[in-house]
Image (cartoon, grey):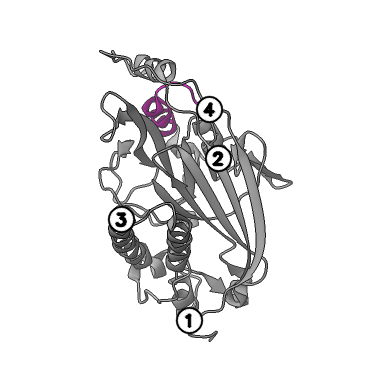
Amino acid sequence: MCVCVFGDSHSDTETFPGSVETADSPKGSWFAMDTVSGRVSVTMETLQQRAEVDSDISDDFPRSSITPAVLAHQGRLEGLLKEFQANSTRYLGFKVLVFEPISVADPTHLGKSVRSYEVWHYCNMISPPEPSNPKILSQKTGGIGNAVPPFYWRKVAYAREMFAKFIDGRMMEFRAVDEGNFQDYKRSLVDGLFGILTDRYQNYPDKQLKQQSPNFTDAECYSYSEMLTRLRERNYGTRLQTIILVDHDDKVHYIERFFTRAPEDFQYRESNLWIYLPPMHAEIRAKKLKDEGKEESRVDEEQPPRTQMFSAEESMSQHQDARGND
């Protein structure tokens, strides 16, 4: 599994990146990963005009509380998402994307299972108004942005196409990878993904982006339509980029690039974290099936969960756009 995310994040000991609390914002998180189950939750705002905001919205239902609630939930995920649906008018516009671990047959080892993921999506805003239900996304490669469904920004479609082509190409190269060149392959993979996140192509004009950003000038919309956003006049731009890679052995590589200066300077600090997820052994899988009202015909004998292991390193890097700064 590969996940690429834009956003802001902080760390604590229970989830990664964890929670954040400020004087004007209740404790919560927009993006986090459970280091035991492997569940990943991403909450995004949907940009909307003030006139579109429902009067029932309450400060008791901050969007930053959604991701912590998803990670803490022990029952069926669909049930929790339907609770969000029942209270949808109490929140400002949001989308929640959940990568839910499931156990599937290992194609390389008969009788064994491995961790895979279902990707759940729910949005409390939809245009034109119609019932919006939690659903599992079927496509292998997807892109989710801030537009109200069923609309999307051009740069989201552009990034999705780039990402799909890149991953397909790397999958072909992976067949020739061995222990001797794996680290070089991995570094090339990570650099290529960050290359997509920092792509400078301007996906504008974009009617949907302009409609959702009425206070932006055309010049600002051109900058806003890039993958790496930078609006000098508004002192606004991309602050953090995150990539999560989960391999066949449940080893997670979590990489963040935090921009230490304005995005146009391309100076960032990169942090790497490695996590070993416990395998989805028989007890965990049986409980999950029970919660879902299903029965398991056969339980494979598997090893008990491995101890979580963490290591991290940070480095300062300078990335200069080959085309130069405009």
Residue 124 against residue 190 in the figure, above or below: above
Q: Is residue 224 visible?
A: yes
* Front disc: 3 or 1: 3
**In the rendered structure, which amino acid carries the disc numbered 4?**
Arg
Residue 275 shows which numbered tag? 2
Q: Position of residue 278 (x, y in %)?
A: 50, 29
Residue 88 in which image quadrant: top left
Q: Which is nearer the N-term, disc 3 or disc 2?
A: 3
Identity of the residue drawn at 55% across and 45% down: 30
Cα separation, mark 1 vs mark 2, equals: 42 Å
- Along the line of sight, the residue nearer the viewer: 227 or 115: 115
Whether residue 189 sits left or right of residue 63 in the image: it is left
Asked which secondary structure carries label 2, the reply is strand
Identity of the residue drawn at 30% across and 38% down: 136
* Front disc: 2 or 4: 4
**In the rendered structure, which amino acid carries the disc numbered 2?**
Ile
Task: For the residues labelled 3 and 1, say whether their Cβ atoms are less than 8 Å apart.
Answer: no
Q: Which is nearer the N-term, disc 1 or disc 2?
A: 1
Q: Position of residue 137 (x, y in %)?
A: 29, 42
Q: Which is nearer the N-term, disc 4 or disc 3?
A: 3
Residue 171 shows which numbered tag? 3
Residue 260 against residue 116 in the figure, above or below: below
**In the rendered structure, which amino acid carries the disc numbered 3?**
Met
Asked which secondary structure carries label 3, the reply is helix
Q: Which is nearer the N-term, disc 1 or disc 4?
A: 1
The residue singled out by tag 4 in the image is 306
Q: Residue furthest right?
A: 23
Stretch in magenta: 72-86
Residue 98 lies within the magenta run: no
Cα separation, mark 1 vs mark 4, equals: 52 Å
Task: For the residues labelled 2 and 4, say whether their Cβ atoms are less than 8 Å apart.
Answer: no
